[in-house]
Image (cartoon, helix red, strand yellow):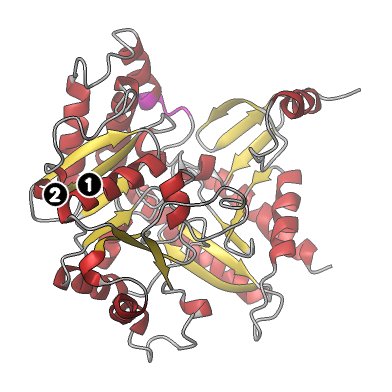
C-alpha cells in the first residue's frame, strides 16, 4: 500500500516539469517554528528554512496575524495605481536599518533575482556605464541577467544561453581554496586588490557601473571573506566611481546575527538587495540604496504589477518587529555561538570536515576526502543529507562541488529541537565512517 507522499510524488512527476528539483520527497501539510509535518504525519526538523526564507520560523503568529488582517482589508491594488501606507512604512524602516550615514530610498520587487536585476538597472542608469562585475562561486538568480552574474553552470545555466552581455566575473576571497594559491593573512588580502588588475585584463573601470557581491556566498558554499576584504573592495570601487551592490538575499534579516551581514565588515555599500526572510515566507524583495542614486531613474522606469504587494509588506513589517523589538536577533547571536562550538567539536572528531565557516548562525561544514589534498567530498555530502532526512532532519548541501553542508534553521528553533537535529547530524557523520 502506497503512502500519501508516494501518491503525491506520482502526481508531481506527471504534472510538473522535472526541471524543478525537489530536495526531499516529503510533501508538507503543516509547519510551525522549526518543525515541518508531512502528509503522512512524519515530523521533520527544519535546518533548511525554505532555503533561508524562514528566519522567524514557519507561521510565526505575528506574521500570520498581519497577513490575515491585511487580507481582510484589500489584497492588491498595484502600488503604481493606488498606493498604500505599508509600502512607505516598510521602505522607511529598511532605510533606517541599512548601513550608511546618508539618505536612502527603497523600492520593492518580488524575488531576489528581481532585486538584483533592478539594482543593476539603477546602477547603469546612474553611472551611464554598461558593465557589471560579479564573483566566482556567486549566485544571484535565474533570470537572464542574473544567470549571467551567477557562477555555477550546472544546473543553473546549462542550455539556457546566450546570456546578457557586459557581465564579468572575478575570483572571490575563498581562503580555504585560494584561487591565487596564497595563505591568509600573509596574502594581505590581495584577492581584493586584484580588482585593479581585473580592470586591465577584463573590463575597464570607466565602463563598469557596479560590482555586485554576496557578503557570504550562499549557493557557492557559505564562503566567508576575511575582515579586511570589503573595505579594500569598497575603496577601489569608490576611487573609480563604481557602485558597490551587496546582495543580502540569503544573508539578510538576521541570518548572521545582524539585520544585514555586511555590518560584520563595517562597510557602507551604495545599494543592498534583500529578499528570502524579509517577509517571513511571502514573496517580497527590496533594493535599498543611496537616495541620489535610487532617485535618478525617470518616472515609470522602475516597478512591477505585484511588486510590494500589501500582504507581503505587512508580513515584512511583522518580521522586522520580531527581529528587532522581540529580540530574535539576540537569539540568533546565541544560536550562532552554540552552533560554532558544536561544529568545531565535530570537526575535531570527523576527518571529513575540512573547514567550519560563516558568521553567526549562518554556518557551514566543507567536507573533504583528505584534509591535505582538500579533495571535495561531494558524494559523501549527498549521502549525509540523505541519512539525515531518513532520521527526520532536513539539511541542505551547496558549493560548486556539492560538498558543503549549510544550516539555515529558523532562529526560533528551541534548544531541544536544535539538540535533536545536531544529534542526527553527528550520528549520520559517524555512519559515513563505516
- In the image, taking residue 206 as reference, residue 148 lies left or right, namely right
The one nearer the camera, 221 or 349, is 221
Q: Position of residue 213 (x, y in %)?
A: 35, 60
Quarter of the rendering containing residue 284: top left
Residue at the spot x=51%, y=46% of the render?
A: 409
| 101 to 192, vertically: above or below | above
Residue at the spot x=39%, y=65% of the render?
A: 168
Q: Position of residue 362 (x, y in %)?
A: 45, 56
| Residue highlighted by disc 2 | 293
Part of the protein shown in magenta: 59-63
Q: Position of residue 347 (x, y in %)?
A: 61, 72
Q: Crowding at label 1, few (<14), some or many (≥20) Cα neighbours within 10 Å? A: many
| 280 to 207, vertically: above or below | above
| Lower sequence index among marks 1 and 2 | 1
Report the Cα–Cα distance between label 1 and label 2. Answer: 7 Å
Quarter of the rendering containing residue 300: top left
Q: Secondary structure at mark 1?
A: helix
| 409 to 80, vertically: above or below | below
Q: Quadrant of the N terminus?
A: top right
Evaluate whether residue 266 shows in this view.
no
The one nearer the camera, 13 or 431, is 13
CB under 8 Å between discs 1 and 2: yes
Numbered disc total: 2
Q: Crowding at label 2, few (<14), some or many (≥20) Cα neighbours within 10 Å? A: some
- The residue at the far right in this view is 1
| Residue highlighted by disc 1 | 122
Amino acid at each position: 500500500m502506497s503512502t500519501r507522499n508516494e501518491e503525491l510524488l506520482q502526481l508531481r512527476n506527471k504534472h510538473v516539469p522535472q526541471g524543478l528539483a525537489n530536495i526531499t520527497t516529503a510533501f508538507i501539510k503543516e509547519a510551525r517554528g522549526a518543525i515541518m509535518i508531512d502528509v503522512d504525519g512524519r515530523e521533520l526538523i527544519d535546518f533548511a528554512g525554505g532555503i533561508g526564507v524562514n528566519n522567524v520560523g514557519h507561521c510565526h503568529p505575528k506574521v500570520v496575524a498581519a497577513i490575515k488582517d491585511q487580507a481582510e482589508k484589500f489584497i492588491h491594488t498595484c502600488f503604481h495605481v493606488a498606493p498604500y501606507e505599508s509600502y512607505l512604512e516598510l521602505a522607511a524602516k529598511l532605510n533606517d536599518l541599512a548601513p550608511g550615514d546618508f539618505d536612502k530610498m527603497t523600492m520593492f520587487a518580488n524575488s531576489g533575482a528581481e532585486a538584483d536585476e533592478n539594482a543593476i538597472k539603477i546602477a547603469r542608469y546612474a553611472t551611464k556605464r554598461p558593465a557589471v562585475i560579479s564573483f566566482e562561486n556567486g549566485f544571484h538568480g535565474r533570470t537572464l541577467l542574473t544567470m549571467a552574474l551567477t557562477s555555477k553552470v550546472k544546473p543553473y545555466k546549462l542550455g539556457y544561453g546566450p546570456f546578457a552581455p557586459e557581465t564579468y566575473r572575478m575570483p572571490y576571497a575563498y581562503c580555504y581554496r585560494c584561487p591565487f594559491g596564497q595563505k591568509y593573512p600573509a596574502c594581505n588580502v590581495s584577492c581584493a586588490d586584484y580588482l585593479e588588475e581585473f580592470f586591465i585584463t577584463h573590463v575597464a573601470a570607466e565602463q563598469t557601473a557596479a560590482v555586485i557581491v554576496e557578503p557570504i556566498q550562499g549557493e557557492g558554499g557559505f564562503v566567508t571573506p576575511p575582515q579586511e576584504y570589503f573595505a579594500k573592495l569598497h575603496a577601489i570601487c569608490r576611487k573609480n566611481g563604481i557602485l558597490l551592490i551587496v546582495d543580502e538575499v540569503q544573508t539578510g534579516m538576521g541570518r548572521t546575527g545582524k539585520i544585514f551581514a555586511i555590518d560584520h565588515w563595517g562597510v557602507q555599500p551604495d545599494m543592498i538587495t534583500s529578499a528570502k526572510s524579509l517577509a517571513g515566507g511571502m514573496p517580497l524583495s527590496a533594493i535599498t540604496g543611496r537616495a541620489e542614486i535610487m532617485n535618478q531613474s525617470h518616472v515609470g522606469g522602475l516597478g512591477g504589477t505585484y511588486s510590494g504587494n500589501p500582504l507581503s509588506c505587512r508580513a515584512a513589517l511583522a518580521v522586522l518587529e520580531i527581529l528587532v523589538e522581540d529580540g530574535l536577533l539576540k537569539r540568533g547571536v546565541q544560536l550562532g555561538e552554540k552552533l560554532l562550538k558544536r561544529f568545531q567539536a565535530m570537526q575535531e572528531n570527523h576527518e571529513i570536515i575540512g573547514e567550519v565557516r560563516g558568521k553567526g548562525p549562518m554556518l557551514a561544514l566543507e567536507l573533504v576526502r583528505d584534509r591535505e589534498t582538500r579533495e571535495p567530498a561531494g558524494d559523501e555530502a549527498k549521502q549525509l543529507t540523505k541519512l539525515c532526512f531518513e532520521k527526520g532532519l532536513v539539511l541542505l548541501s551547496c558549493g560548486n562541488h556539492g560538498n558543503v553542508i549549510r544550516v539555515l534553521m529558523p532562529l526560533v528553533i528551541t534548544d531541544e529541537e536544535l539538540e535533536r537535529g545536531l544529534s542526527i547530524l553527528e550520528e549520520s557523520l559517524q555512519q559515513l565512517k563505516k
